[in-house]
Image (cartoon, helix red, strand yellow):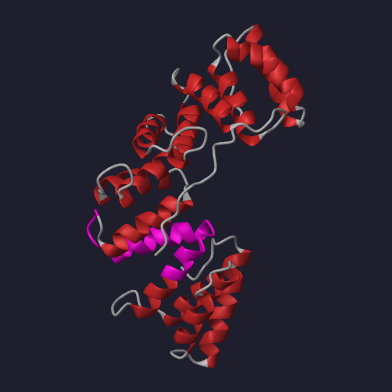
Amino acid sequence: MKMFRHLALVAVLSLSAAGVSAQDFEKGLAAAGSGDYETALKEWLPLAESGDPSAQFNIGLMYEAGQGVPQNDAEAVKWYRLAADQGEPSAQYNLGVMYEYGKGVPLSYVEALRLYHLAAQQDISDAQYNLGVMYNDGIGVEQNYAEAAKWYLLAANKGDGGAMFNLGVLYDTGSGVAKDRGEAIKWYRWAAGNMIAEAQINLGVIYSEDNGEFQNQTLAMMWLIVATQNGAELGPDYQKIVSAKLTAAEISKAQTMASECISSGYASCGD
């Protein structure tokens, strides 16, 4: 069962304080939105140098992505740090990513963990998710499934599909939480609706292999068809196993259900 990890930096252009600086910031925001990063830098740099954390964060984004400036991770780190030290949560998260992957700074899971905590406490869902993964896998901290579940739940409640899937895995395996197949199905179903193919596979496996109230071979086949259409490599293999348990009419029904599931945007999936 795969555990997801966010790799991308937060690519959000922040808002600034009120007044003249806000007008200049908005000019930069409009310029960046149209791809004119040279003008954006011209508007933001004076603000950043005077201590505006939103401008500092955005200049960090520009250096990290090489937009309007030469790509330079160390320079991105410099600007992220200035903003993070003033409590800018997205900058704290991005700086954490830089430390986790050793981009522009020496790799440090401990520092990444510290920064993710700061950002997570300000409701940055990606930071909450990454904390879940670090506690789940024991990266920079002692492995703690219960703590992982806590952070996954916060991110999942904000709509993070990967966190939903990982929470489903914890309930499925009884890691850090009481083993509960019904709860696992609930979270896999939410993740499946976010097009997480691994969650769709896991639903198929549960509905096929469960020996109790959740066994439903037709529903299992439906989710395996959906997962295969979403690129799950193991989908065809699992379909062969489940198809041996179904009649031709039941397979046809599962195919119809899968089409309805996808066309409904995962709202109607045999539930």
Instruction: Return the x and y of residue 8 as percentages of the image width and height.
Output: 54, 43
Magenta stretch prevailing secondary structure: helix
In depth, the one of 191 and 73 nearer the eye is 73
253 on left or right of 2: right
Above/below status of 150 relative to 196:
above
Residue at 25%, 58% in the rendered image:
175
Q: Position of residue 85 (x, y in %)?
A: 44, 19
Res 177 → quadrant: bottom left
Q: Residue furthest front?
A: 106
The residue under the point 70% across, 32% down is 67
- Where's residue 215, x and y in %? 36, 78
Q: Residue furthest left?
A: 178
Residue 150, picture quadrant: top left
Question: Looking at this view, is 53 or 258 the one in front?
Answer: 53
Taking depth in this image into account, of 147 and 251 the one nearest to the observer is 147
Q: Is residue 223 left or right of residue 168?
A: right
Nearest to the observer: residue 163 or residue 249: 163
- Relative to residue 89, is residue 215 depicted above or below? below
Q: Position of residue 1 (x, y in %)?
A: 39, 65
Q: Which residues are magenta?
A: 176-202
Residue 213 located within the stretch drawn in magenta: no
Residue 192 is one of the magenta-drawn residues: yes
Specify whether 97 is left or right of 121. right
Q: Residue at x 76, y 32 (%)?
A: 35
Name the residue: 57% across, 26% down: 75
